[in-house]
Image (tube, grey):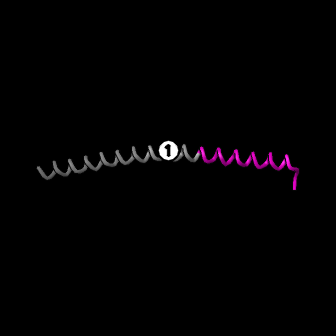
């Protein structure tokens, strides 16, 4: 009987850890996706700048 209780405790601990890890992963994911969005925006702005520079200097 006590063995079963211990096993349940272990499983409970593992489940708690898994949830904590998942929460951490979600936080990291939302942070990195925010960073990716910024990177894409910068890339887009650079591309726009390049095309307007070409227009100013005339097509090569």
- What secondary structure predominates along the stretch shown in magenta? helix
Image side of residue 13 versus residue 39, left or right: left
27 to the left or right of 5: right
User: Depth check: 56 or 22 in front?
Assistant: 56
Front residue (pair 40, 26): 40
Q: What stretch is highlighted in magenta?
A: 37-60
Residue 32 shown left or right of residue 52 in the figure = left
Q: Which image quadrant: the C terminus?
A: bottom right
Q: Using residue 53 as the reference point, say whether residue 14 is left or right of it.
A: left
Q: Which residue is drawn at 16% across and 50% down?
A: 6
For the point 73% across and 49% down, which residue is it?
Answer: 47
Which residue is label 1 attached to? 31
Residue 40 location (% of width, % of height): 63, 47
Residue under the image location 88 percent in, 50 percent down: 58
Residue 44 in the image, given as x and y percentages of width and height: 69, 46
The secondary element bearing badge 1 is classed as helix
Residue 57 locus on image (x, y percent):
86, 49
**Dot 1 alpha-carbon crowd within 10 angstroms: few under 14, some 14 to 19, many 20 or more:** few
| Pick the front one: 54 or 18 | 54
Residue 42, x across and y down, in percent? 65, 46
Identify which residue, 26 or 5, lies in the foreground: 26
Residue 49 part of the magenta segment: yes
Q: Which residue lies furthest to the front in this view?
A: 57
**Count of marks, rendered view:** 1
For residue 14: magenta? no
* Residue that appears at 34% across and 49% down: 18
Identity of the residue furthest to the bottom in this view: 60
């Amino acid at each position: 009987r006590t063995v079963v209780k211990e096993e349940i405790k272990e499983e409970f601990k593992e489940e708690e850890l898994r949830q904590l890890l998942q929460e951490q992963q979600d936080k990291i994911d939302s942070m990195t996706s925010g960073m990716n969005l910024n990177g894409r925006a910068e890339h887009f702005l650079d591309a726009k700048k390049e095309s307007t520079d070409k227009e100013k200097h005339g097509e090569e």
